Amino acid sequence: MLPPPAVPAIPAPVHDVRPITDDRGDRKRPDRAILVIEDDLNFAYILYDLAHELDFDCLHAANATKGVELA
């Protein structure tokens, strides 16, 4: 009998990504906010800028758990 094929190790998700500096401490539009849940910080900054272009405050969470807490 042949041994079972080796299964590659799946890297553990990274949970220590810090959120970007967002608008949660300085809300200018309390009735217009977008919650961005994104672990890619470069893309989070793009979404932050886009939210501001569309006249929204932007709140960022780096993972789903933090996003639910923030929501």
Image (cartoon, rainbow, N blue to C red):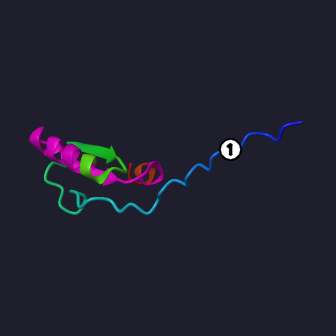
Residue 49 % position (x, y): 15, 46
Residue 35 % position (x, y): 31, 45
- The reply to whether the magenta stretch includes residue 47 is yes
Q: Between residue 46 and residue 25, name the one nearer to us.
A: 46
Q: Residue at x 43, y 63 (%)?
A: 16
Residue 6 % position (x, y): 71, 44
- Residue extending farthest right: 1
Q: Quadrant of the N terminus?
A: top right
- The reply to whether the magenta stretch includes residue 59 is yes
Q: Hey, what amino acid is under mark 1?
A: Val
- Tell me which corner region of the image, top left, top right, bottom left or bottom right, holds residue 3: top right
Residue 45 % position (x, y): 21, 50
Q: Between residue 35 and residue 13, name the one nearer to us.
A: 13
Q: Residue at x 62, y 50 (%)?
A: 9
**Count of number-bearing discs:** 1
The magenta region covers: 44-66
Q: Is residue 31 visible?
A: no
23 relative position to 7: left or right: left
Q: Residue at x 39, y 60 (%)?
A: 17
- Residue extending farthest front: 1
Q: Between residue 70 and residue 37, name the one nearer to us.
A: 37
Element under disc 1: loop
Query: Dot 1, crowdedness within 10 Å: few (<14), some or many (≥20)?
Result: few
12 relative position to 6: left or right: left
- Residue holding disc 1: 7
Q: Is residue 39 visible?
A: yes
18 relative position to 42: left or right: right
